[in-house]
Amino acid sequence: MAAVESGQPRAHGKGKKHKKRRLGVRVDMTPMVDVAFLLLTFFMLTTVFSKPQTMEITLPPDEKTTVEVAESNLLTLRIKADGAIYWNLGSEKPEPIAFKQLRPELLKRYYPELSGNEQGLLDVLNSKDPLEALKRYKPHPRLITLVKIDREGTYKMLVDIMDELNLANITRFSIAPMLDADKEALLKAGA
Amino acid sequence: MAAKKKPRVGIKMDMTPMVDVAFLLLTFFMLTTQFKPPESVQIDLPSSHSAFKLPESDVMIITVTKEGRIFLGVDQQQLRVRLFGEDFRLTASVEVESKNLTDLLVQARISNPKLRTVISGDIAAPYGVIEDVMNTLQKVKINRFNLVTELEKA
């Protein structure tokens, strides 16, 4: 209710001109404030502060570019359709590896100083900012990772693997199609 | 002696400062709110530790659903009309055939060279489709693109 209070009842005089009294106008603000709070709650509850995150990839400019890599420096990760991960260095036999084990093992290969240093490895794995923690160690100069994912696999595998690689500060890796030859190699390895 | 009844005290508080603050907050939230654009497809994003933010404008989003269907979306209405026709002015993303993707991407890039490409795939999207999309991007010389993820709580 917007109650408008008049100051005092005006005295009625006859024929006399009255000086108008200043009216103390009081508007009841309650409904407006109610609405304001309602809107405030609405906006507070609907606001989304978090924008989606993204992961950046840069592909080599042309499909025909080839990079010569010594086989012994090539770390191949193969992911089967069911999500099983196999890895091998160079011409070794592909070995299964659990997703949880992937990052420690990658770190050991990429940072030779970490391979005998259990405490250092744990520190890196448990640190809040692994990239910062890794700055103390020298990476392997020539190791290249090749990621091959089965076409029947899911997108999540790609993102998970890339995330692990990023966390291990492995920024140079390539994504290659899984060929029949790769599948055969996996079969031979007893997968 | 009868105890004296205390007269009830009418408490009047000055609400003005509280209301002021409330309005301030209201204005803040009203001005900062961005309503989520209506999404034509439901996507469960995978999570990662990456901390890049999705750019606000000039983005072209390639959405891949669980079933492997591909949707292309751009944030500017003008470009939408040019790519898909007048009917799709207000449609956030339009389903495209894998074989048409190349042409559409080239057209979009010509119309707006600043466009950033973003792939937003469902967790369960088949990798084969993603691989095809990435090959297409490479073919049309979009070498830098982003994958949309959610921040992993860890």
Image (cartoon, coloured by chain):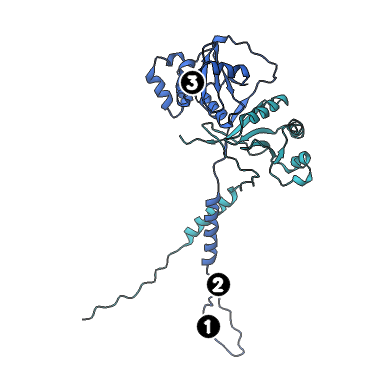
Chain colours: A blue, B cyan
Tell me if mark 1 has few (under 14), some (14-19) or many (20+) residues whose alpha carbon lies within 10 angstroms of its own: few
The amino acid at mark 2 is Ala
Circles 1 and 2 on the same chain: yes
Q: Can residue A29 be seen in this view?
A: no
Chain letter for mark 1, please: A
Occupied quadrant, residue B76: top right
Chain letter for mark 2, please: A
Q: Quadrant of the N terminus of chain A?
A: bottom right
Report the disc number at residue A156. none
SS category of the residue bearing label 1: loop
Occupied quadrant, residue A114: top left
* In the image, residue B119 above or below residue B35: above
Q: How far apart are marks 3 and 1 (CA)?
A: 95 Å
SS category of the residue bearing label 3: strand
Circles 3 and 2 on the same chain: yes
x, y (%) of residue B98? 72, 32
Residue at the limit of the structure toward the bottom, as seen here: A14
**Mark in front: 3 vs 1:** 3
* Image point (55%, 46%), residue name: A48
The residue identified by callout 3 is: A96
**Could you tell which of marks 3 and 2 lies nearer the N-terminus?**
2
Q: How far apart are marks 3 and 2 (CA)?
A: 77 Å
* In the image, residue A112 above or below residue A47: above
The residue identified by callout 1 is: A9
The residue identified by callout 2 is: A2
Q: Can residue B7 be seen in this view?
A: yes
Tell me if mark 3 has few (under 14), some (14-19) or many (20+) residues whose alpha carbon lies within 10 angstroms of its own: some
